Amino acid sequence: MAGVSEDPKDPMSEAGQVPRGVRVVRGALAALSGLIAGLVALCVAELVSAAVRPEAGPVTAVGGAVIDRTPAAVKDFAVRNFGNDDKLVLQLGILALLALFAMAVGVASLRYRKVGPAAVLVFGAIGALAAVERPDGRVSDALPSVVGALVACAVLYLLAGRLAYRPSPDGDRGTDGAAADAAPVTPPGSFDRRGFVIAATAAAAVSAGAGVLGRRLNASGAAEAAASREAVALPAPSSTARPIPAGADLGVRGLSSFTTSNKDFYRVDTALVVPRVDANSWRLRIHGKGVSRPLTVSFQDLLRRELIERDITLTCVSNEVGGPYVGNARWIGVPLADLLAEAGVRPPSKGGPADQLVSRSVDGMTIGTPVDTVMDGRDAMLAVGMNGEPLPFDHGFPVRMVVPGLYGYVSACKWLEDLELTTFDDYDAYWVKRSWSREAPIKTQSRIDTPRPFASPKAGKVPVAGVAWAQHRGIERVEVRVDGGSWNPAKLAAEDSEDTWRQWLWEWPATSGSHTLEVRATDRDGNTQTDKRVGTVPNGATGWHSVVVAVD
Ligand SMILES: Nc1nc2c(c(=O)[nH]1)N[C@H]1C(S)=C(S)[C@@H](COP(=O)(O)O)O[C@H]1N2
Ligand SMILES: [Mo]
């Protein structure tokens, strides 16, 4: 691949004369130059992103752009297979691809000294475009990629020059300017080894420095946000949550606990960099159609209002039958309906002009919720607390929405900063643009937590247990059957509220052999889960969860 050309006028075309060994070494070093240029680009971009914002870094931007363009089915595949690691996999994938391209570009620039740097600029342009095109993109977001690419371009050009072959015997039958400068130290019949080592080492060192400094600066913004979170003292709610009834947690081994801890709570979002918002400078704007008194409130304003505390189970629309994206927490927040009423909002059922409440996050997510739903008396809230502490950054600090009964993508906006009243006709939110339904109440579902698939319990009494949810309707009944036989009523745990999931237990007189367990729930509206399996797109999966076990 390295520099084989028959054109005698091409200064690089010494193929015939370049000894094979030198050619191999130059090729390897050219690939290394590409890698170094790539490193330079990313590190310089990291430094510049500290001046712009961390999300504008090229890998994050390209990753975000990939997420924005991922079809619903592929996104679901990624969430299913990589779970909460999907973003790590995506970024490692981007880095691996980038490394391969960087090496190829390095090798190409050995022969075509301008092609490599030009390719670097193309990559920079991709990063810049990706950053600007994000839903929350600004023109300044292009800077990290552009500056990173320009510097990398110069570095690659310089390194490629050091690798230019200087034929013997006349050392200055030069390749071009840069290499000619180095002529005196270039031994005949080789290339500027010393110059290359010096330039490569300097580039690697300087870029590492820039990268570390960029990281530090980016982290210091995060540190201020962390300090603002540490300083939050959640006031006592004026309306406390009902105490969890003693029998709400059946305490069966292998069964999800009634309350999901913050650290175990599922996380689903498009953010490659978790937004770190400083609560002190945070503001929420409420505006739009029919808002007669637009409001801007600070975090302290919210804390001074009457707060409610409620147990509410969140569910992701991407949760497969039997899947893990459901969790129950104790939230503290400001009743959303009161705040909207203060802003002059009337729900459409009372003649208001706006039927959609669009919540926007600092990272550009948009989520559309029916105004009638948030104002129908349910405990829709702007949550500031989760399980007794300020919201964790992962879960939306300082403020997120929580609306009992609706899937997260139509209700649970994290890192909230703007509430706009509009209509469903006028505006499609982020996921609606990507083939998910406008409205999405949570479907009645049940899950077997124990035994696990392919477990091999001993014959005899085997506890079969799990959770069932039908938020804002409540769970009426859960039934289990074995091998398609008749349905057995499970024992239901005490109900906390209709907005929370409910544990259930059935003692199975298990006989040895392979068996299939199935579960179905019935909600308080009298609807029993259908056995018809549909996928998560466009508004949530249906079907019965089943588990196959081999009883000893
Ligand atoms: N800003 C922002 N908010 C968001 C999302 C997102 O991608 N960005 N994802 C939503 C989805 S799809 C779900 S299911 C819930 C998940 O909330 P959790 O991560 O706290 O469990 O957040 C919602 N809020
Ligand atoms: Mo979701």
Image (cartoon, rainbow, N blue to C red):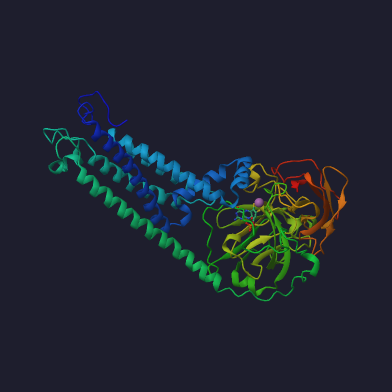
Label total for image: 0
Residue at the spot 67% in from the left edge and 53% down from the top edge: 325
Q: Residue 141 placed where, x, y %? A: 45, 51
- Give the percent coordinates (x, y) of residue 493: 81, 62
Along the viewing direction, whichever of 106 and 296 lies nearer the viewer: 106
**Residue farthest to the left?**
170
Q: Quadrant location of the N terminus?
A: top left
Splitting the image into 4 quarters, where does residue 343 fall?
bottom right
For residue 150, side relative to residue 77 (left or right): left
- Left or right: 248 in relation to 136: right
Does the image show residue 48? yes
Task: Please indicate whether residue 116 sits to the left or right of residue 534 in the image.
Answer: left
Image height of 108 relative to 282, above or below: above
Q: Position of residue 69 (x, y in %)?
A: 56, 42
Q: Residue at x 24, y 23 (%)?
A: 6
* Residue 243 coordinates in the image, percent (x, y): 77, 71
Q: Residue at x 75, y 70 (%)?
A: 241
